[in-house]
Image: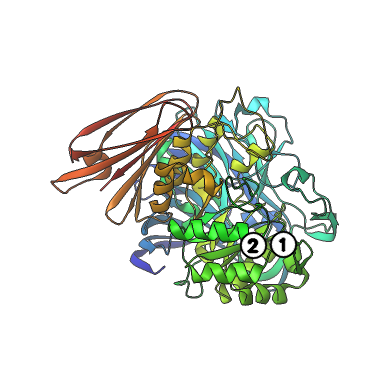
């Protein structure tokens, strides 16, 4: 995680009054931000002269400063930085961070920092007050160019699982006042793809958006909770146990945040790509987050055998499968025999509100000890508010049990109370060498950089929706890599081994099917990324398909290098990732057949003048069949692959 500074250059500082304008360019000159302080503080952004964001306001109203203070007397400081950032785990070993920065320093302890990267633009408010500061409101506007296509992630309120479809619309078809999540994506009339999100979220609520008049989108935030109540969720379809509930905010304060006033507020991030594929390699959310403050060398990414999606459905075994000792030992054996690092023990292992009341059919300590003896580690599921009831004692209990990580669920909020809890949880788990997989959770905000023990985050409409909904469509699968996965790790939980066409699809709790082929499910392990990846379906189904089983045994989850080969939102994608001496390429299609045409020398920079072994995993004669083939190729050979609708392709070069 060491940051290597290559260049830091102070350009100039000047003392200026009202009405000043500034221009800030990306290092390559393609992105241009104009910051204006005439009637109010605004910014606009263009790419190659094309409008990305039109003049939009920035302000904050607090107990220490007001919106008008952003127009006050100030000094302006410009500087630049170019450095390499090393990752502990992720889609690459190293990221180049190169930006130009403008900082407006006001006389009252307030400042605003603007950064322009080749990949986008960001700003944040910074204050220097040695006292508590209450934030009543923040103004962060995003005025979108006319005729843009927007993928508005609509939600009904601030109480949400953060699991939505991203459907293309025009701004004119979205009612004023409609609430949405971030990340938020749109395509400009000139073809740029834009993703808006945030980074470095501490002591502050998560950012939502609201459609305003015309083409305006404004940031909005949940108020600070004053009173909470435990209630049954509207998501009872997710569980079979009616006692499950979540903490609902019943009363709020009249402010959104409170904290010590000597701080930096979260970054507002506008990621920009000149084509759809380019956005897949955008790392701004990660780069803008704080570095870790302790050693995380113990963090081990890997794959996880999951129990919940297939409803503990093991076929042909000599015991009754379910939440019991025999089932989890079977899962451990499957993991150990296939080089899978983890198993997951999900909901039902104990009473939701008392971890000491373990399911009588499950000898939890025996399973954990058995797993450890086989070299397999255990994730265990828990409600966040159950952990919170006796925070320290519960974390100590999990640590003493010998689990490797906790899958914490049902946050369903992003107010400051929840954000503070998540950051505290990550820090305290790190002190105990515990990993975290966060579900029912807001999107990543660079938290996986600050706390690398957060190895995955849900915040996505994933494979589990096949149990109770028809929303997990092929188009959805081909949209989320360009928006949700761009901001950080994404626990979609791939690996379905049972498939039907969208026309044949029927939701099923006991026997869920996906709408895409087995070949696409395999490709997801390359296209989607996270520090842990679930094997969602039953081990007995994987055992019946040696091609799938062998691939899942060997495919990595963390990478040395990533190259986006091609992509079009909602239609097709091809991503190449390198691990060691091997390249893995994942290709996916939505509702149309697609021809993928690669020159591996040009695409992957294969400089060695030798032959490579190319292994291909593709769709067979049916959606549920895989075929394996291999051949020798030269570095300059051009390869063409025709992939059917709703399908996928895996290519391995070595």
Residue 109 horizontal/vertical position (percent): 62, 68
Q: Residue at x 47, y 46 (%)?
A: 543
Q: Quadrant of the N terminus?
A: bottom left
Residue 64 horizontal/vertical position (percent): 72, 65
Front residue of 183/433: it is 433
Q: Residue at x 77, y 55 (%)?
A: 223
Residue 139 horizontal/vertical position (percent): 67, 49
Left or right position of 222 against 455: right
Q: Specify the label residue 361 is tagged with.
A: 1
State the residue position of label 2: 325
Is 481 drawn above or below residue 168 in the view shown?
A: below
Check whether the beta carbons of the residues at disc 1 and disc 2 lie within 8 A of each other.
yes
Q: Secondary structure at mark 1?
A: loop
Q: Secondary structure at mark 2?
A: helix
Q: Is residue 153 visible?
A: no
Q: Is residue 68 visible?
A: yes
Binning the other alpha carbons within 10 Å of mark 1 as few (below 14), some (14 to 19) or many (20 upward) gives few
């Amino acid at each position: 995680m060491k940051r290597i500074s290559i260049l830091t250059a102070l350009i100039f500082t000047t003392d200026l009054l009202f009405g000043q304008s500034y221009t800030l360019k990306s290092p390559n000159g393609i992105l241009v931000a104009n910051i204006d302080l005439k009637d109010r503080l605004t910014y606009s952004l263009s790419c190659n002269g094309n409008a990305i964001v039109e003049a939009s306001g920035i302000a904050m109203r607090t107990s220490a400063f007001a919106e008008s203070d952003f127009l006050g007397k100030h000094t302006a400081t410009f500087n630049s930085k170019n450095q390499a950032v090393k990752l502990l785990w992720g889609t690459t070993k190293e990221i180049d961070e190169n930006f130009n920065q403008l900082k407006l320093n006001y006389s009252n302890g307030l400042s605003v920092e603007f950064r322009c990267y080749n990949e986008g633009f960001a700003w944040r408010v910074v204050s220097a007050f040695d006292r508590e500061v209450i934030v009543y409101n923040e103004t962060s506007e995003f005025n979108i160019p006319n005729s843009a296509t927007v993928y508005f992630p609509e939600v009904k309120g601030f109480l949400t699982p953060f699991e939505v479809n991203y459907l293309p619309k025009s701004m004119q078809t979205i009612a004023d006042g409609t609430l949405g999540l971030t990340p938020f994506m749109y395509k400009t009339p000139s073809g740029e793809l834009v993703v808006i999100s945030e980074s470095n979220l501490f002591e502050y609520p998560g950012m939502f958006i609201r459609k305003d008049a015309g083409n305006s989108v404004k940031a909005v935030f949940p108020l600070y909770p004053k009173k909470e109540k435990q209630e049954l969720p509207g998501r009872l379809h997710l569980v079979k146990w009616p006692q499950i509930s979540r903490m609902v905010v019943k009363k709020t304060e009249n402010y959104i945040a409170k904290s010590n006033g000597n701080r930096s507020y979260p970054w507002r991030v506008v990621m920009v790509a000149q084509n759809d594929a380019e956005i897949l390699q955008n790392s701004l959310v990660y780069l803008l987050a704080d570095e870790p403050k302790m050693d995380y060398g113990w963090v081990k990414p890997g794959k996880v055998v999951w129990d919940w999606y297939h409803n503990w459905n093991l076929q042909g075994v000599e015991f009754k499968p379910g939440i019991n000792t025999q089932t989890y030992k079977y899962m451990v054996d499957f993991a150990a025999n296939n080089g899978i690092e983890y198993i997951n023990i999900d909901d039902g292992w104990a009473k939701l509100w008392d971890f000491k009341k373990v399911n009588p059919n499950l000898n939890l300590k025996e399973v954990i000890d058995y797993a450890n003896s086989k070299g397999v580690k255990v994730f265990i599921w828990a409600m966040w508010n159950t952990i919170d009831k006796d925070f320290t004692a519960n974390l100590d209990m999990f640590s003493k049990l010998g689990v490797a990580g906790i899958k914490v669920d049902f946050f369903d909020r992003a107010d400051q109370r929840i954000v503070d809890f998540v950051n505290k949880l990550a820090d305290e788990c790190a002190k105990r060498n515990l990993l975290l997989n966060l579900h029912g959770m807001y999107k990543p905000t660079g938290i996986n950089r600050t706390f690398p023990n957060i190895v995955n985050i849900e915040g996505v409409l994933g494979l589990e929706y096949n149990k109770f909904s028809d929303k997990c469509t092929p188009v959805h699968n081909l949209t989320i890599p360009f928006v949700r996965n761009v901001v950080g790790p994404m626990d979609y939980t791939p690996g379905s081994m049972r498939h039907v066409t969208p026309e044949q699809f029927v939701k099923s709790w006991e026997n869920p099917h996906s709408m895409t082929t087995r070949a696409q499910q395999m490709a997801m392990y390359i296209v989607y990324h996270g520090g842990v990846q679930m094997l969602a379906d039953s081990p007995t189904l994987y055992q019946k398909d040696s091609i799938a089983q062998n691939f899942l045994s060997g495919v990595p989850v963390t990478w040395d290098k990533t190259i986006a080969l091609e992509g079009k939102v909602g239609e097709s994608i091809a991503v190449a990732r390198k691990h060691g001496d091997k390249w893995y390429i994942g290709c996916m299609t939505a509702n149309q057949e697609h021809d993928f045409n690669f020159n591996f020398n040009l695409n992957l920079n294969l400089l060695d003048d030798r032959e490579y072994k190319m292994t291909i995993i593709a769709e067979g004669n049916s959606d549920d069949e895989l075929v394996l083939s291999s051949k020798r190729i030269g570095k300059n050979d051009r390869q063409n692959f025709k992939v059917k609708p709703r399908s996928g392709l895996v290519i391995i070069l070595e």
